[in-house]
């Protein structure tokens, strides 16, 4: 009998890097700081994060007054949204889930359109062409195969365009997520997939979502690059997404942004039923907005006078959004006309019935 002819070696060894550039006290690591990020651009990021939060706070309050339908706030997750959106080039295409209001904001969607969506109007799904983004996707992770396909199409048509898609921590457990990564990896499609890991999928914690140490490492099995980023550090998010977009011609990247959902899942959820106040308080101490404000203040680029003026100006912007959305007269035909490429006979029948009813007269 021969002994020792087998092999037990290492077939694969992987590593996921973690990136943080500005720490929780607002101190930056110069060696990692993106060269193209001067103070004016960081101030722009800060302003966008502040506006995203002001909009969030307003829509939450409108919902509590019965002036919008269910709302999914993004409180505490502003750095992922703003950092990634500011890293995109104009021609890049984004494919969101449903908690990326800040991405729409940076990409130039008129904010009343966002509000129309949450008011339940079909018109809130009509994203102007120049915004280069898709409507929200509520069915968890279904946007991921779409984004891989859209990325493949850009490559097929020889366009220098990256596709940036978003998915939650919960969404990474869906088959759609793995299939999208696998497809993008095989075809080396220019996809930048961002996991907005906010630690919760409604009441399911991150620890029950996957036994994997990081969600980023799911990319390893698909043969694509990945990095884990401090998702409450807007500069780190910007840097990681910008690099991934630059590399997108060579293939896809998965970026896990570690953040926290400060608010409820949606307005129909009560998170006090399943998570502790102390956990929420701990994360409030890592607030992405306070961090970038501390950074700018230390550099002498931000002060209380500027802050006061900004808050006043943004309050007007938010009021203007509400005024425009509430003055909007929806066309109920839109409910039927955009379901398919053309209106089917069944839908036509339903549209005619609706037309004949009081609903059609706008008395919703
Ligand atoms: C396919 C599918 N299953 C279930 C739901 C119900 N649902 C809506 S959001 C959500 C949790 C999503 O969690 P995560 O992906 O972490 O995103 P987050 O809400 O935290 O942004 C679930 C289960 C759904 N919308 N779609
Ligand atoms: Mg989540």
Image: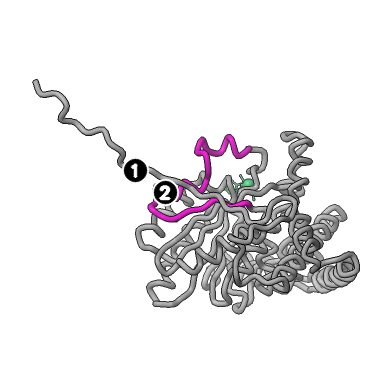
Front residue of 300/15: it is: 300
Q: Secondary structure at mark 2?
A: helix
Q: Single out the residue that lies furthest toward the bottom.
A: 130
- Find residue 322 and report its image quarter: bottom right
Magenta segment: does it hold 214? Answer: yes
* Residue holding disc 1: 12
Identify which residue, 187 or 83, lies in the foreground.
83
Q: Where residue 187 sits: x, y (%)?
A: 36, 62
Circle 2 residue: 220
Front residue of 229 and 208: 229
In front of the other: label 2 or label 1?
Answer: 1
In reply to whether residue 148 is colored magenta, the answer given is: no
Instruction: Compare marks 2 and 1 and give the one earlier in the sequence.
Output: 1
What's drawn in magenta, residue-wise? 205-230
Residue situated furthest front in the rendering: 31
Q: Position of residue 85 (x, y in %)?
A: 62, 67
């Amino acid at each position: 009998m021969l002994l020792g002819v087998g092999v037990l070696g290492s077939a694969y060894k992987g590593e996921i890097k973690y990136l943080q550039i500005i720490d929780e006290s607002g101190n930056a690591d110069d060696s990692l700081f993106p060269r193209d990020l001067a103070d004016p651009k960081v101030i722009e990021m800060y302003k966008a994060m502040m506006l995203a939060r002001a909009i969030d706070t307003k829509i939450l309050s409108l919902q509590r007054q019965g002036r919008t339908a269910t709302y999914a706030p993004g409180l505490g997750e502003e750095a992922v949204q703003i950092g990634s959106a500011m890293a995109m080039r104009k021609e890049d295409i984004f494919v969101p889930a449903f908690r990326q209001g800040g991405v729409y904001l940076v990409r130039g969607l008129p904010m009343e359109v966002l509000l129309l969506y949450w008011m339940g109007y079909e018109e809130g799904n009509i994203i102007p062409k120049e915004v280069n983004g898709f409507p929200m996707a509520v069915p968890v992770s279904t946007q991921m195969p779409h984004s891989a396909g859209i990325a493949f199409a850009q490559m097929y048509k020889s366009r220098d365009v990256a596709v940036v898609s978003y998915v939650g921590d919960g969404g990474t457990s869906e088959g759609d997520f793995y299939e999208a990564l696998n497809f993008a990896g095989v075809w080396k499609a220019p996809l930048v997939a961002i996991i907005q890991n906010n630690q919760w999928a409604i009441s399911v914690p991150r620890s029950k979502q996957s036994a994997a140490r990081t969600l980023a490492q799911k990319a390893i099995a698909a043969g694509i690059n990945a990095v884990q980023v401090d998702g409450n550090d807007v500069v780190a998010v910007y840097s990681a997404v910008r690099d991934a977009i630059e590399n997108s011609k060579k293939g896809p990247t998965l970026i896990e942004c570690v953040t926290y959902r400060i608010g409820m899942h949606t307005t129909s959820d009560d998170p006090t039923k399943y998570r502790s106040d102390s956990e929420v308080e701990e994360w409030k101490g890592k607030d992405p907005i306070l961090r970038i404000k501390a950074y700018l203040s230390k550099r002498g680029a931000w002060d209380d006078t500027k802050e006061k003026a900004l808050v006043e100006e943004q309050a007007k912007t938010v009021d203007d959004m509400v005024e425009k959305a509430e003055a909007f007269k929806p066309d109920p035909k839109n409910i039927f006309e955009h379901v398919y490429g053309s209106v089917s006979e069944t839908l036509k029948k339903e549209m005619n019935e609706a037309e004949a009813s009081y609903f059609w007269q706008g008395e919703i």
